[in-house]
Amino acid sequence: MNHYLYEGPVMMFTKIITEKWTGDTHAISDKKAASNLIYQFKKEHGLVKTTKIALVNKHLIHVLL
């Protein structure tokens, strides 16, 4: 699995709710990493799983270990 980092804004529906959020995860692909990070954000902020959340900066940092 690869290690991914995200640092940037987060949107809820069409509004930026956080200018800078940082999260990291391990995943097999960029798509799964983004999904994991969105789940992580929702859990940290007490949001229900159906809340529409998007990472504004689509570029995840793949960390080489």
Image: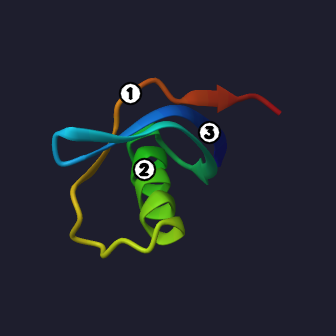
Quadrant housing residue 61: top right
Question: Residue beneath label 2, please?
Answer: 32
Distance (Cα) linking label 1 and label 2: 13 Å
Which of the two residues, 54 or 14, is positioned nearer the viewer here?
14
Circles 3 and 2, Cβ within 8 Å, touching? The answer is no
Residue at 62%, 51% (x, y): give it.
25
> Dot 1: what SS?
loop
Tell me the kind of residue under disc 2. Lys
Give the position of the C terminus as an image quadrant: top right
Distance (Cα) linking label 3 and label 2: 10 Å
Residue at 61%, 47% (x, y): give it.
23
Q: Earlier in the sequence, mark 1 or mark 2?
A: 2
Count residues near mark 2 (Cα–Cα under 10 Å), then give few for <14, some for 14-19, many for 20+.
few
Which of the two residues, 50 or 63, is positioned nearer the viewer here?
50
Residue at 21%, 56% (x, y): give it.
52
Question: Residue beneath label 1, please?
Answer: 58
> Dot 3: what SS?
strand
Residue 7 picture location, percent across and down: 57, 32
Q: On residue 4, which mark appears?
A: 3
Count residues near mark 1 (Cα–Cα under 10 Å), then give few for <14, some for 14-19, many for 20+.
few
